Amino acid sequence: MHEDTAEAGRPFTDDGTPESVWRAWQPGWPELELSPAPPAVVVVAPHPDDEVLGVGGLLVRLRALGTAITVVAVTDGDASHPGSPTLAPAELARRRVAEQHAALSALGLAQVPIHRIGLGDGRVAGQEAALADQVESLLTPGCWVLTTYTGDRHPDHEATGRAAVLAAGRTGARLVEYPVWTWHWAVPNDPGVPWARARTVPLPVSVQEVKRRAVDCYTSQIAPLSDDPADSAVLGVPVLARLLRPYETVFV
């Protein structure tokens, strides 16, 4: 989940809507129905960490219900720290791939297949058709495809979502979108967000702890690479507070 391309810079430079504001809002969304559980789920992540931040807890719950899980890694996240004096893009990509493997292991998903698409970080937009073809090849009727929300206001997240929408529409798979940056820029009752489609996924304390350990594997994103400003953490305390709730939210 890096914040934007080297060319455009990070679009989310403030702290965003505080988690305390979200916690005070009680919209009463229904729970996501997990019975019967889907036979298979394909989770599509634009960057290494989006799969954990958005739906890591849901993946743990589904695996416990016997669902087969596949991960699609759209990019390797090499552009999260443009201008870094510490890690060149190729080195950063290698590190983020390793972090993703460690994070999935922390979730108990060490053996799930990971399909690495290899698109350029920050350059997914415009490649939706090709990405949709690759996602489609992994889908079957009755399975779910979990993807970043098409209105998340991150170009890679939105393009990934659009590709998954195409793939799901062709196969009869159920589309489930997960917001990531929406919690940063939106506010409660924001008219630009499809709240009527929102469903909650309660996370037992044990699942919350597992998700936290998985997030901790992404040290390149949650901690500075060095003291240089270009190496600052992408996922600061306010961001993580919104993504480590005792529940997750998806749009169906």
Image: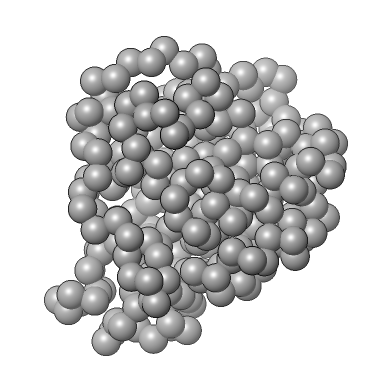
Here the colouring is: one colour
Compared with 140, 27 (above or below) is above
Residue 73, position as x, y percentages in the image: 60, 61
Instruction: Answer with the quarter of the image where residue 20 lies.
Output: top left
Instruction: Answer with the quarter of the image where residue 123 lies.
Output: bottom right
Residue 98, position as x, y percentages in the image: 48, 69
**The one of 227 and 130 positioned closer to us in this rendering:** 130
Residue 153 in sight: yes
**The one of 127 and 92 positioned closer to us in this rendering:** 127
Residue 207, position as x, y percentages in the image: 43, 33
Q: Residue at x 63, y 22 (%)?
A: 34
Compared with 203, 215 (above or below) is below
Q: Residue at x 73, y 34 (%)?
A: 174
Q: Is residue 202 left or right of residue 109?
A: left
Residue 109 in sight: no
**The one of 8 and 72 positioned closer to us in this rendering:** 8
Q: Quadrant of the C terminus?
A: top right
Q: Is residue 67 left or right of residue 190?
A: right
Q: Residue at x 64, y 66 (%)?
A: 126
